[in-house]
Amino acid sequence: MELGVQGLNAKATLGPAQTRLLARRAEALGYASWWVGEHVVLPSPRTADSPMAPTDPILDPLVHLAYVAAVTTTIELGTGILILPQRNPVVLAKQAASLDILSEGRLLLGVGAGYLEPEMTAVGVDMAGRGRRTDEYLDAMAALWTQQAPAYRGRYVAFADVDAHPRPARPGGPRIIVGGHSPAAFRRAVARGHGWFGNGTQDELVAHLAGLRRAAAEVERPPELGRLEITYMQLNPVTVDADAARRYADLGVDRLVVYPLPLDDPADVATFLERHADLPR
């Protein structure tokens, strides 16, 4: 089981000096992946389902990861997650390929369908169609990354007689990690993802894994995707002890991601990273 860290593109950890220090420290401590979230805008005033206050700062994940790529050498760079329906898939395919090239194949493109209606509305996306839009966007990006003559036609995106180079550093494109806990998200992970990203408690993980097994019985998994990788972030409590880490490994988690909330002091975050670096794997 590998160890990752989440969320350090926000609040007190987002500055260049803090990013350099924490990213290099995480890499030196043996963290295998660095994950960042996304919110283009947030509901104001804050709503019950919003994870952050509207005045909490958070950097664009791809811009942030490009900076992290430049100050590190081995740690994988994950979006955990990027809200795919809010992005133009043709532009995103180019951005992801560019970041994958510049990081020498370290990008893990975590995506989800989103859930905050005010954010969707602000970028002009219909909440009702976000699931189908997410599926189409994944297929369209794969066409741009893999087809000799890229073409795609769907309800939300269509193109032909175009091409986009350079292709990503990884053959077939960045590894796609699908986030979410709904039956639709589980099916999307099985059908289109190299992996799945979830969060919550250990008991919730057991239920999520059961949902993924049900999805595997309902939809076909393309053989080229290989085994579905499991990435999980414990939210309650945010501190992970040795016994919990062992249980995660026993449950089949491939990447355990820690989240050093509340992100109010970079020194506290560094201490959190050092304390968790020796978790059993």
Image (tube, grey):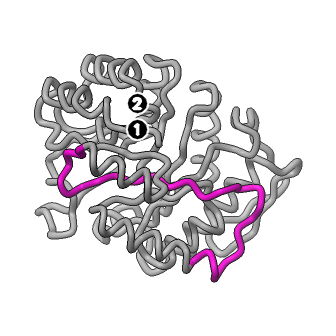
Identify whether 8 is placed above or below 126: above
Q: Which image quarter: residue 157?
A: bottom right
Q: Is residue 268 in sight in this rendering?
A: yes
Left or right for 142, reference 272? right
Q: Which image quarter: residue 52?
A: bottom left
Three-letter amino acid code of the residue under disc 1: Leu
Give the image location of residue 79, x and y in percent.
45, 45
**Residue contact at pointers 2 and 1, CB within 8 angstroms:** yes
Residue identifier under label 1: 3
Residue identifier under label 2: 31
Q: Is residue 86 in sight in this rendering?
A: no
Task: Return the mark for residue 222.
Answer: none
Could you tell me how far apart the alpha carbons at marks 2 and 1 are, in whole angstroms?
A: 5 Å
Q: Residue 225 in magenta?
A: yes
Q: Secondary structure at mark 2?
A: loop
The residue under the point 42% across, 66% down is 180
Q: Earlier in the sequence, mark 2 or mark 1?
A: 1
Q: Which image quarter: residue 102?
A: top right
The residue under the point 63% across, 46% down is 93
Give the image location of residue 17, x and y in percent.
26, 17
Nearest the eye: 84 or 68: 68
Nearest the eye: 254 or 192: 254
Q: Quadrant of the C terminus?
A: top left
Identify whether 223 is placed above or below 82: below
Q: Which residues are magenta?
A: 215-241
Three-letter amino acid code of the residue under disc 2: Tyr
The residue under the point 70% across, 32% down is 169
Nearest the eye: 77 or 196: 196
Count of numbered badges drawn on the protein: 2
Left or right for 57, reference 124? left
Identify whether 82 is placed above or below 72: below
Q: Residue 38 in magenta?
A: no
